[in-house]
Amino acid sequence: MTRSFDALVLGAGAAGLMCAIEAAKRGRRIAVLERADQIGKKILISGGGRCNFTNLHCRPENFLSANPHFSKSALARYTPADFIALVEKHRIPYHEKTKGQLFCDRFARDIVRLLEEECRAAGVQIFPAAAVREVRKDTEFVVAVGDQEFRARALVVATGGLSIPKIGATSFGYDLARQFGLKIRECRPALVPLTFNAEDREHYVDLTGVSADIIASCDSRQFHDKMLITHRGLSGPAILQISSYWQQSAPITIDLAPAHDLTAFLRHSTAGRELNAAKTAFRHALPQRLADRWLDLHPPKDWTNHSLAQLERHAHHWQIIPSGTEGYEKAEVTAGGVDTDELSAKTMESRKVPGLYFIGEVVDVTGQLGGFNFQWAWASGFCAGQAI
Ligand SMILES: Cc1cc2nc3c(=O)[nH]c(=O)nc-3n(C[C@H](O)[C@H](O)[C@H](O)COP(=O)(O)OP(=O)(O)OC[C@H]3O[C@@H](n4cnc5c(N)ncnc54)[C@H](O)[C@@H]3O)c2cc1C
């Protein structure tokens, strides 16, 4: 059986559904083909189940891409205020958690319901459990699903990245891009915990669960936020953020006590300069177990002012070399993807293959932590939805 539409959208995630809604509102006949038996699965697990659906301070600087200018047009055309208006239209209660991050008060399912209702109102047809067998192009795009064929003059690929394979992430979107001759920027896990090298693991693994307010930096980027020690390495928002900029084998610099003068008390007295006094001083700024362990492992050479100054510097510039990341199983997103040189920044259409669009995480645009990835999904989906 053959079904004809104006456009086919592959993937019922954030980007695909937004695109479908916008196109259907313009009178287009849209089919969304979703491999899973349920739509918006990643939205449901996002933001710890509360979906950090956008960020009030969203700017192009919050995104990584080989072309840092690419996201500008889409982000300007569909802003956080546009999505907030939709959330308010559906009377979904939400709050700002921190740093402009907007979360649902109740649960992420509210956002999936919003998208479902908008799809229904606009007349989008959604086909869950659609296992795509083949995609080809003759006069139109043809997508084979089981013994059915879907045909349309436009095809939108919104199949997401490689992170969290256990909820169905695959390389489908990248494979399809290659099939049509589009270049891919190398993919890697991003917003991902980092793993200790063998030595650090031995030194810190029993501090699992300890968290500290730090600045993590590498590659001239820095993030001031929480760091969490895990049984495998380091996590927490500051580490997830810096992981997106980290290259294998490079060091990460950690300021263990931002804006604290840890050794001031010791420097200003000549009496009582010894390890226990240093631990007491460090405990004012750091969790006790981390303060004690770090000083046991990095004691000053002696207690001169010079050595105390060195200790101070070291605590603000502690370098570790992670052995790697926890991979796509734990990564929130995939960095890299369909090369933005291949796409129109205004419509997300392929420059080489007219009628073929890529949106959302499959594109080489990756947001920092804090609702930016959904904002990119909404914005890129919106732009394609205006064009198809
Ligand atoms: C644990 C976790 C928490 C996160 N929390 C947040 C957060 O709070 N805020 C934020 O901004 N970002 C968050 N993210 C990132 C965010 O979820 C993604 O960047 C965003 O969902 C990408 O949207 P997308 O539509 O491009 O892809 P997805 O949401 O991944 O959707 C892709 C869809 O395509 C489907 N699909 C795959 N292959 C096929 C195929 N062959 N045929 C048909 N369909 C297919 C998939 O089943 C899926 O439904 C989180 C990610 C994770 C893993």
Image: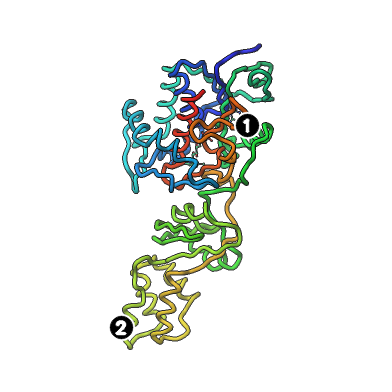
Task: Tell me which residue sits at (51%, 15%) in the image.
Answer: 29
Q: For residue 156, which quarter of the picture?
A: top right
* SS of the residue under disc 2: loop
Category of crowding for the residue at label 1, using alpha-carbon neighbours closer than 10 angstroms: few (below 14), some (14–19), many (at least 20): few
Which residue bears the numbered disc 1? Answer: 352
**Which mark is on residue 268?**
2
Residues at badges 1 and 2 in contact (C-beta under 8 Å)? no
Label 1 beta carbon within 8 A of ligand 1: no
For residue 134, say whether it is visible: yes
- Please give the name of the residue rendered at 51% of the width and 32% of the height, measured from the top-left corner: 41
Q: Looking at the rendered structure, which numbered label has been put on residue 301?
A: none
Q: Amino acid at mark 2?
A: His
Look at the numbered disc 1 and give the secondary structure of its residue: loop
Earlier in the chain: of badge 1 and badge 2, it is 2
Percent coordinates x, y for residue 300 in the rendering = 46, 81
Kindly report the distance in space between the C-alpha atoms of the residues bearing marks 1 and 2. 68 Å
Q: Amino acid at mark 1?
A: Lys
Nearer-the-camera pick, 159 or 386: 386
Q: Percent x, y for residue 124?
A: 49, 18
- Front: mark 1 or 2: 1
Residue drawn at (67%, 31%), measured in percent from left and top? 180
Q: Measuring 63% from the left and 21% from the top, which residue is drawn there? A: 141
Where residue 100 sits in the image (x, y, percent)?
Answer: 34, 45
Residue 256 lies left or right of residue 32; in this view the side is left
